């Protein structure tokens, strides 16, 4: 791989070189999905080397149950990212819960060469320190200022890519968001129909004699639009 971050679910805490075909893994090019580091703490940093004089690489390992607990303790951080981010965080917890493997391993050494020397401990610790902030607005500012995380911020807020947070399905559109947008458009269409119907009725009502005025009727949108409107409200609330 080149310039990828990889998140592995495995019963083997050192799974990269002998990954079981049944073990799921996620990988994203050029960025660190922001949710991923929320699974870990500084004590989860591990260092491997082929020998004391050659190749060194860092990774982070945590038991899945502890990773879920770590992530849940940091859910307040996503409030400054908006409602979609908070929903994605809940869905990410569900995704973690549905996995069967004991360990979650985050490999970072492939991206921007971070993790190839002992000094890279400092870079990883700076990233993890952002997640120890108690205020969501402070965390948001720290992400923008961190050289390793700022690109994820740009991808999420400027490009609207959810994978910059969760690392899931980078090529898939946000179906929930699309449904809301479609529902909003249908809502506007429905309101337009209602408005036109009422305006048309008022015009007829104002020009007719009292003896010619029809009994007032309730004007409702077509049934299919009305049903979609109700479903749209259910999505929102």
Image (tube, rainbow, N blue to C red):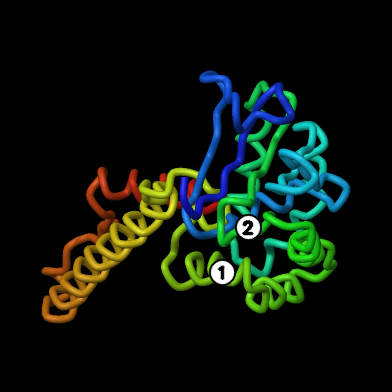
**Is residue 154 depicted above or below 78 in this figure?**
below
**Is residue 33 depicted above or below 46 in this figure?**
below
**Residue 106, percent from left and from top:** 67, 43
Q: Secondary structure at mark 1?
A: helix
Question: Is residue 158 or residue 129 the one in the foreground?
Answer: 129
Disc 2 + disc 1, Cβ < 8 Å: yes
Q: Which mark is residue 184?
A: none
Asked if residue 230 shows in the view, the reply is: no
Q: Residue furthest right?
A: 43
**Residue 13, percent from left and from top:** 74, 29
Q: Which residue is mark 2?
A: 34
**Is residue 168 depicted above or below 160 in this figure?**
above
Q: Secondary structure at mark 2?
A: helix
Q: Which residue is mark 1?
A: 153
Task: Give the left or right position of residue 169, taking residue 24 as reference.
Answer: left
Question: Is residue 85 or residue 68 the one in the foreground?
Answer: 68
Label 2 Cα neighbours within 10 Å, binned few <14 / some 14-19 / many ≥20: many
Question: Is residue 236 or residue 229 the one in the foreground?
Answer: 236
**Residue 102, percent from left and from top:** 74, 24
Q: Residue at x 66, y 49 (%)?
A: 36
Decide which of tag 2 and tag 1 comes sooner along the chain. Answer: 2
Q: Residue at x 74, y 44 (%)?
A: 60
């Amino acid at each position: 791989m080149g310039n990828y971050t990889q998140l592995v679910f495995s019963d083997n805490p050192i799974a990269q070189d002998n990954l079981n075909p049944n073990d799921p893994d996620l990988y994203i090019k050029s960025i660190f999905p922001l949710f991923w580091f929320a699974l870990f703490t500084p004590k989860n940093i591990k260092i491997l080397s082929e020998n004391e004089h050659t190749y060194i690489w860092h990774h982070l390992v945590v038991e899945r149950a502890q990773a879920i607990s770590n992530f849940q303790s940091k859910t307040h951080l996503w409030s400054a990212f908006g409602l979609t981010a908070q929903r994605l965080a809940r869905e990410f917890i569900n995704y973690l819960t549905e996995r069967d493997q004991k360990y979650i391993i985050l490999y970072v050494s492939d991206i921007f060469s971070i993790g190839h020397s002992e000094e890279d401990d400092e870079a990883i610790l700076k990233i993890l320190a952002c997640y120890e902030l108690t205020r969501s607005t402070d965390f948001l500012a720290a992400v923008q200022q961190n050289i390793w995380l700022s690109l994820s911020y740009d991808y999420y807020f400027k490009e609207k890519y959810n994978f910059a947070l969760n690392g899931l399905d980078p090529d898939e559109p946000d179906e929930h968001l699309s449904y809301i947008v479609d529902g909003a458009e249908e809502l506007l269409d429905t309101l337009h129909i209602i408005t036109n119907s009422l305006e048309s009725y008022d015009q007829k009502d104002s020009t007719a004699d009292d003896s010619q005025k029809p009994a007032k009727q309730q004007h409702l949108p077509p049934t299919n639009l009305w049903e979609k409107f109700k479903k749209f409200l259910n999505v929102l609330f």
